[in-house]
């Protein structure tokens, strides 16, 4: 896991899902609850995106290096 993703966990804005049934469920229903997969290569990593409840999740980054938050 990248340093940036780890810092998001520290801020309480990200969570890693361990159980594969949970990731399958979240991939279908997470947006309804404002939880989005952010990185295509990290199907276990979800973040709080309250706007997803109304507008759906934003487009995924291929991996954390594509995330502008890791460019700082
Ligand atoms: Zn993570």
Image (tube, rainbow, N blue to C red):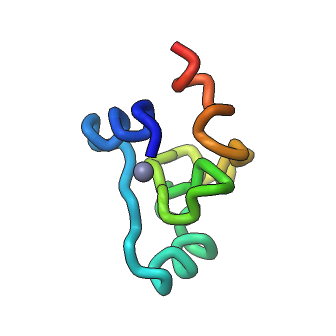
Residue lying at 50% horizontally and 55% vertically, measured from the top left: 34
Tell me where residue 3 sits by quadrant.
Answer: top left
Q: Between residues 66 and 26, which one lies in front from this camera angle?
A: 66
Compared to 55, does 28 lie above or below? below
Q: Between residues 64 and 11, which one lies in front from this camera angle?
A: 64
Compared to 46, does 6 lie above or below? above
Q: Between residues 12 and 44, which one lies in front from this camera angle?
A: 44
Q: Between residues 35 and 62, which one lies in front from this camera angle?
A: 62
Q: Position of residue 44 (x, y in %)?
A: 49, 64
Q: Position of residue 17 (x, y in %)?
A: 40, 68
Compared to 44, does 58 lie above or below? above
Residue lying at 44% horizontally and 46% vertically, measured from the top left: 1
User: Image check: 5 left or right of 55?
Assistant: left
Residue lying at 38% horizontally and 48% vertically, measured from the top left: 14
Compared to 58, does 70 lie above or below? above
Residue lying at 68% horizontally and 55% vertically, measured from the top left: 40
Tally of numbered discs: 0
Tell me where residue 8 sits by quadrant.
Answer: top left
Q: Position of residue 41 (x, y in %)?
A: 64, 56
Q: Position of residue 71 (x, y in %)?
A: 57, 18
- Given the current orientation, which residue lies at the most extreme top position? 72
């Amino acid at each position: 896991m990248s340093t940036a993703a780890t810092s998001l966990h520290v801020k309480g804005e990200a969570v890693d899902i361990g159980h594969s049934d949970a990731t399958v469920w979240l991939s279908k229903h997470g947006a309804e609850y404002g939880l989005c997969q952010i990185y295509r290569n990290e199907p276990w990593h979800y973040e709080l995106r309250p706007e997803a409840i109304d507008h759906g999740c934003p487009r995924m980054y291929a991996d954390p290096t594509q995330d502008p938050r890791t460019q700082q």
